[in-house]
Amino acid sequence: MAHRTPMEIRNSIEANRQELAVSVERLRGEVTRITDWRGHVERHRPEITAGAAVVGLLIGVRLLRRRRRD
């Protein structure tokens, strides 16, 4: 293994520290974007509305069928 001077070691540590800071900041942004449920709802509003309508229709049909049996 090559011997490094204390200054080379310090420089390497500092470079690693800076890379880590950039990675952590990038990760924070990604976590914020992924966990933004309001943004997901806004982007998928038509799909959510259609899904809610289908679920409501299915519940209504089941209730009507149950009422007819009784």
Image (cartoon, grey):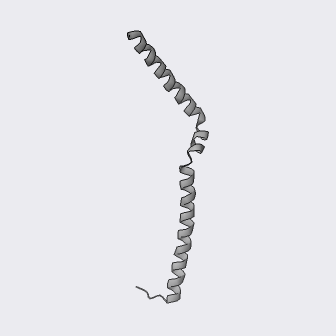
- Nearest the viewer among 67 and 30 is 67
What residue appears at the point 53 percent right and 69 percent down from the top-left corner? Answer: 20
Residue 67, image x, y percentages:
42, 12
Q: Is residue 15 above or below residue 31?
A: below
Count of labels in the image: 0
What residue appears at the point 60 percent right and 35 percent down from the top-left corner? Answer: 45
What residue appears at the point 40 percent right and 15 percent down from the top-left corner? Answer: 66
What residue appears at the point 54 percent right and 64 percent down from the top-left corner? Answer: 24
Q: Looking at this view, name the residue that lies furthest to the front.
A: 70
- Nearest the viewer among 46 and 37 is 37
Residue 69, image x, y percentages:
38, 10
Would you identify the image quadrant in which residue 50 lies?
top right
Residue 15 shown left or right of residue 65 in the figure = right
Q: Is residue 63 above or below residue 14?
A: above
Q: Is residue 64 above or below residue 52?
A: above
Residue 45 shown left or right of residue 3 in the figure = right
Q: Quadrant of the N terminus?
A: bottom left
Residue 37, image x, y percentages:
55, 44
Would you identify the image quadrant in which residue 26 lies?
bottom right
Q: Quadrant of the C terminus?
A: top left
- Nearest the viewer among 37 and 3 is 37
Residue 48, image x, y percentages:
55, 33
